Each structure stands twice: as structure tokens, then as C-alpha cells.
Amino acid sequence: MKAKCRILQENLQENGGKIVENQKKRIEELIKLLNEASEAYYNGQDEIMSNYEWDTFFDELTGLEAETGYILPDSPTQKTGAETGSGEREAHEFPALSLAKTKEVSELQKWAEERPVWVSWKLDGLTLVLTYDGGKLTRILTRGNGTTGTNITYLKNSIKGFPLKINYKGHMVVRGEATISYTDFELLNDTMEDEDEKYANPRNLASGTLSLDDPEKVKERRVHFNAFTLVYMEEEIKSWGKRMDFLAGEGFTVVDRELVNPKDLPGAIEAWTKRVESGEMDLPVDGLVICYDDTEYASSGSVTGHHATKAGIAFKWQDVSALSKLLYVEWSCAASTISPVAVFEPVQLEGTTVSRASLCNISEMERLGIGKESTLEVIKANKIIPKCISVKNASGDFEIPSNCPVCGARTQVRISPKSKTKTLHCTNPDCTAKHVKKFTRFVSKSGMDIDGLSIQTMLKFMNEGFLKEFADIYHLSEHAQAIKQMEGFGEKSCANMMAAIEKSRQVHPVNFIYALCIPMIGIDAGKKMIAAEGFEGFLNRLESGEGFEDTPGIGPEKSGSALEWYENSKNQKSLQALLKEVTIEKIAPKPDREGKCAGFTFVITGDVHHYKNRDAFKSYVEAEGGKVTGSVTSKTNYLVNNDVASNSSKNRKAKELGIPIISEDAFLEKFG
């Protein structure tokens, strides 16, 4: 702080004690604007501005600070961004500093000097710091402000990409990026009915996800950790490349990397950039990182602001924009939200032809100032996502459709009480687009197993009027010519999809039952129903109203759910239409065989040793006629926990209910 004041005083003296007042005001405006955007960015909130806009404002602020010496303590040039989650805050063992950034390859070469450097992705997610002791993961911290982070160790089983146990037994600290792929982002966002739950990009979704308290919900969102540096280990490895190889050998997902001589950096940067432009990357990236292979030399640098001068340097791409005339705004329904998409005259951007860009919602259209006729300035954010960043020559008001493009029902503009965002919604509770989750389950591998029908593809077909119920999937061939002309399709992809649909006409009865989307009836329940009655018996029990209460493993709740589903005439009509399109494989009923675990209900918790994992343990119990549940209740017969004496919540519950707690060895003696 004293150094900053000294800089300011020196500049004041050089300027004759005067700073141009409008420059000072502009610096304060930029700091406020950037800090608000940064807070939203790091905490999974609604996006205030694009990365393109943030970089532009940040560069302007940096230039003004350098020119005037007017540097405030809360300037984003002087601190790292930080999430403000409600979890417990803890100090980092090693400060998680950010990297200096440049958009010039020549600056990278200058920084590299004559030393070999590694090029890797700058992933756009949430930085996590993992600590291991004695071969076990002991702590996960978010990056926070670089000095302290939020402890999210309770999510260790919900995030993929790192091992819970490693061979190395010493103290070790690993840093990496938690990301959600574009594919999973689109899938999750398109099925979120509450507009306040939707996220602007995969990075915001990852940040918002890791602030959730429910580990199961986090697991569903498929967050993946990508290690990008080994911060510390007791056994010294002085090569960054060998450190990454070591982590990969221990079971970590490690970022892609390439060792490059400084003179070859321009070619290497161009090759890595083309990988992004080609669409190869499903993970969000917003640049590249260059670091020294010599870790000892890398650690010898000083700290300037919130950067370690030799720890690495980030390369961010120069955003290329293009102007194009708006042709029309297309409104597309997904879940309950009808979202606008700008369709404009095709332009070349980053080596590809672009003619469409999402406008997100009505509020974003108003912010941009889009008119019925407009000239749009468009970029490809992070080299991938087309985005409109400004509007010129706007005239006329844009029109908000009064009817849903899928079902034709009346639309309604809603304002979120949380974010004040204006969005358009379909008012029909039975609109096909609102049930896209059911279509996703129908075509899944556990259902009809139809490749090529992603959630985005089905939403396109719904908006075109091709899909209204499940059976319509088997009539998509009638629209083949129109589908071939749609963006993302061609002769081959259309033919492959049609072949997958035809293949699915022959289906196992359990998969068919799962595909029907009967509440509470999944694969396990379907197996029990078919084992007891066969498919004809399943239909007969639905039609007669007899139900499945006496079917082993079903019970009154699931039976009632199945009967209630069938009482709905729409579901009966859908079932009958499907039975005309598919052939159900003949599977003879077979009563449950008696096994060593028959009649017993188990809860399995903690690590297992004899079985490969808990799923393998569960499979054994079920094969022997037993049942495995996730929580301890009065109906539980045994809690299996190798740490019999632990004070875990399940152990405490079992003791309260008088349920025996046995080890895996004791289980094998009794039931193995």
C-alpha cells in the first residue's frame, strides 16, 4: 500500500500536482464496473458483460493507471477475483496467484527468454487446490482471493478427475481447474425450468455448482477437475513436464501440454489456436498458458501486484469482430423459456461461417438496443460461441411473439424477482418443449438407446413441429429432406440418425418400461416387474388396475405411481401409439431366486476392500436376493461400514435404531 501511495505521489509531482479530473472519474467508473462484473463472474451469477467487454475495459483501466499513476486499492489490476460462497474459509498453504496476461506472441517470446517452455490450455472454470497426506485426499479449497478459499472437501465424491487415494505417501498440493463441458452445459441449461437457475456460460455453471450444499446435485452436473500444476511435494521434481507426468501416473486428469522452444512459439500458438477454432475442444478455454519447464527457475521470480513474475504467463486471443445485417430474430422454446436467436447475413469469423447468435433474453436485447432492423457486431467468444457485442443503426422495435413456436399457446413476459431479467415463457403446462427431459430419458441408453438425438436436436425438431409425442420419433423420416437442410445436419448425419431410430424398434421390455418415464419406475423396478410377470403381465396389471404391490421389491408406493400414470388418458394414448411402432422382445418371467441375502436390506457406506467398489458390492447383494438402500431406516437390517467405530451420521442413526453395524469381513462371513 505504501508503494502504491509513493507511485501516486511521484506522478502527482510530475503532473504538477494535478490529475485530469475526467481521467480520475473514468478510472473510478471502470473499477466499479469491473468489480461488479468480476463478482458475478466468480460467483456464478448472471453475466453482466462478456469476456470481450471485460478485457476491453480492463485494458483501458490499465492504460489510464499507467498514464496517471492514480491506482486505487480495490482496482482489479491490484487484486485477484474471488468467489464469496458461504462455506468455511481457510488459508491457502501456498498463495494461489494469478498470471500476467498478454495478447502478443512477441511478449511470450520475450518472457520465455531462451528457456524451454510448456504450452497448455487456459481452462475457463473454477480453480481448486487439493491437498494429500499419507496417500489420501485431505482437503479441497477453492481459489478464493488467492490467500484464502472455501473448503469444499465434502464434494470430493462429486467431482471427477482426481483420485481419493494415491501411491505417494508424502505431503502434496495440486492445483487445477474444475470445468463443465459445453455439451453438459447445454444439456443442463436447456432442462432448467426456473430462469434464475440458468447460467450464461459453462464457467458460471461450474462456479454456481460448487457452491451447492447437495453433493448428489453437484455429481449430476458432471464437474471435472483438470490438474494444471503440482504446487508442492516432498520429493523434489525440478521439471514441470515430469511433474505433470507424475500426476497423470497417480490417476489425475491433466491438461494437454507441449514443450516448445521460444523461437517456435508463433507456430505452436497458431496450431493450438486452430484446435479451438476447429471445434475440437468441448471444454471451455479462454486462452493458453506458458510456463517454464525449470520449476526452480520459475519459483525464483518476485511478486508484483497479484502476479508471480516467473510462475507463468497467459496468452489471450485477440477477438475478431465482424458487422452483419440482422435478418430476423428467431424465438426457440426450451423447457418453459422461449429464447431469442439473432439470424444475420453470413460472415466469416475465425475461419468459419457464422449466421446465428443467441441473444439470451429480452433484457439482453434491450441492453444491446436491437431494433427490427439493425447492424450487429459479432465475435466468437473464446473462439467458439458466436456472440453479439454491440448494435449499430438500429431502427424500429423488435417484436416479442405472442404465441409459443412449439404449441401455439399464449406467451407471457416474466421479470425475475432475483435478477430482474425479462424472459419470455409459454403458458401451456403441456407444451412438448416443457417435457424435453422425458424425451431425453426416452432416447437414452437405458431407454430406447437412439444415437444422434441430443437434447438440442430434439428441441430443434420440437420448434419445427416434428416432435409432439414419443411415437413421432419413428416418423422423423417423413421430414428427412427438411432435416438435411438444418444447421448441423447433412446426408450422412441424417442417415445415421434414421438408422439408429430403426434399430431401436426392437427393444428389451425393461428398457421400454424405463423409456415410458413412469414416475418412480426405473431400471431396477422394471427388472422386478418383468421377472415377476413378463411384459404381457405388466400391461395386464396396468389395464386391470391390479397394480404391483405383491411384486417383490415394488411395494405400494411404486405400484400406486405406475397406476396413477396409466390412469392419465394421454399416457395411455402415448403407450398405444408406441406399441404400434416397436417390437418388445419376448422375455419369460422368472421368479426371484432365493439367495444368501434374501429378505435382508443393507446400507453400504465408506470404502470397501474385498469388492472393486460399492456398486460391485451392491450387485452381489442384489444377485443374492437382497436389497441395498442409500439411507438407514427402521427397515434396514445391516449397516456395512469398515469403520465400525466411526461417528458418521449413518453410524449414529444405526445405533439410535438398534441396527447392527458390521464390517465387510463380517458381512462375508455371514453372507459371502
Image (tube, rainbow, N blue to C red):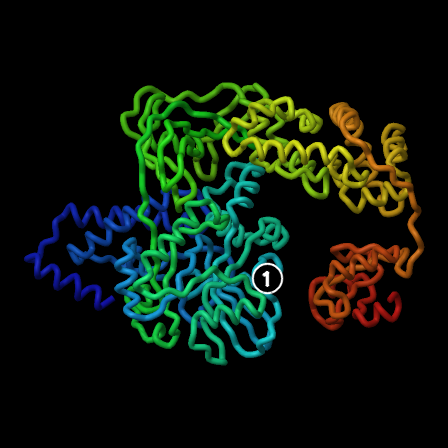
Question: Which residue is rendered at x = 45% and y = 69% of the image?
Answer: 241
Question: Which residue is rendered at x = 36% and y = 30% of the image?
Answer: 366
Quick check: can you spot residue 89?
A: no
Of residue 474 and residue 510, the one placed in the foreground of this image is 474
Q: Position of residue 170 (x, y in %)?
A: 55, 79
Of residue 244 and residue 168, the one placed in the foreground of this image is 244
For the N terminus, give its image quadrant: bottom left
For the C terminus, give its image quadrant: bottom right
Q: Is residue 99 left or right of residue 474?
A: left
Of residue 360 and residue 84, the one placed in the foreground of this image is 360
| Circle 1: residue type | Lys
User: Is 209 above or below relative to 516?
Assistant: below
Q: Position of residue 287 (x, y in %)?
A: 38, 53
> Callout 1: 10 Å neighbours few (<14), some, many (20+)?
some
Of residue 391 and residue 580, the one placed in the foreground of this image is 580
Circle 1: element type: loop
User: Is 634 above or below relative to 40?
Assistant: below
Q: Position of residue 247 (x, y in %)?
A: 53, 69
The image quadrant of residue 368 is: top left
The image quadrant of residue 152 is: bottom right
Q: Is residue 487 left or right of residue 596?
A: left
Q: Position of residue 156 (x, y in %)?
A: 59, 62
Task: Please name the residue that numbered disc 1 is placed on.
Answer: 156
View extreme (bottom): residue: 235
User: Is 634 above or below relative to 114?
Assistant: above
The image quadrant of residue 543 is: top right
Question: Which residue is rendered at x = 28% and y = 68% of the image?
Answer: 113
View extreme (left): residue: 16
Number of on-image labels: 1
